[in-house]
Image (cartoon, rainbow, N blue to C red):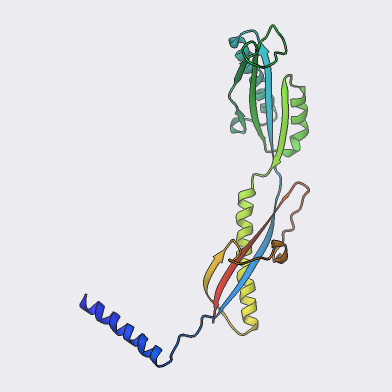
Amino acid sequence: MKYVWTVLVMLALAGDMRAANGETQPPLRTISVSGSAVGHVPADTILWNVTLLTADKTVVEAKVSSDGQVKGLVDACTRLGIQGSNIVVGIMRIQDARMEEVEARDASKPFNVTRVVTIRQQEPRLFREMLEMLSRGKGYGVRYDVVSSRTDQIKKETMVKATETAKEKAAAMAAVLGAQLGNVLTINEYPPVGWNSPDSSILVDQSSTAFGVDAETIRITIFVTFEIQ
């Protein structure tokens, strides 16, 4: 322990002597750049939300009617190659029109039953067949959204491209001035403090050749600071 303290004191004294002699550390030379890349996320999945509506005389009969609707829908989806985890059946909701403020479509069938089924269709080319099948179903309320199953993957790929581009830019700029890149000092996916320029002012360094009417455009900018030697 005494040896450690002796070394620390000697280092401190050496620092004080350099300061007294006017010796200072040369300022750290840095280069800060941004790398921007664009990726396109193709729409490859259709999410259907089908609301099944039925009514019956008793709760038991209402449940049987709803179960029959679900089975018919699942069987139709299976014929289109959609099954398993791509079909999620929601909780059955039963309302008694005699007790609640809801309107019964048929006074003799006061128990209204609602159930939502979510269907994930990963073959967009079968959209027409799916739409026709659902339009033939009695008591079906249908809506759908077009989404992508690769959003997270393409975001990561675009982020990597933006980072690679930032490094290439920094190396090229330093080389022009006869310098080389040293250690990486900072890497940020958010603009530096005090940055007031809009994203549109940052040039896109690496674009994507992918295209499509339904494709979502993702733009990612990475801010990096290197030491230069």
Give the percent coordinates (x, y) of residue 3.
23, 79
Does residue 129 sit above or below 136 in this rendering?
below
Closer to us: 204 or 98: 98
Q: Looking at this view, name the residue that lies furthest to the top.
A: 108
> For residue 80, which quarter of the picture?
top right
Q: What residue is shown at x 61% (from left), y 8% (from top)? A: 58
Give the percent coordinates (x, y) of residue 62.
62, 13
Q: Looking at this view, name the residue that lies furthest to the left.
A: 2
Q: Is residue 104 left or right of residue 227?
A: right
Q: Quadrant of the C terminus?
A: bottom right
Mark count: 0
Does residue 51 sit above or below 201 in this rendering?
above
Q: What residue is shown at x 64% (from left), y 27% (from top)? A: 117
Does residue 174 sit above or below 111 in this rendering?
below
Give the percent coordinates (x, y) of residue 15.
36, 85
Q: Looking at this view, name the residue that lies furthest to the bottom.
A: 21
Q: What residue is shown at x 21% (from left), y 75% (from top)? A: 1
> For residue 11, which quarter of the picture?
bottom left
Closer to us: 44 or 58: 58
> For residue 67, which quarter of the picture?
top right
Closer to us: 10 or 165: 10
Give the percent coordinates (x, y) of residue 95.
62, 16
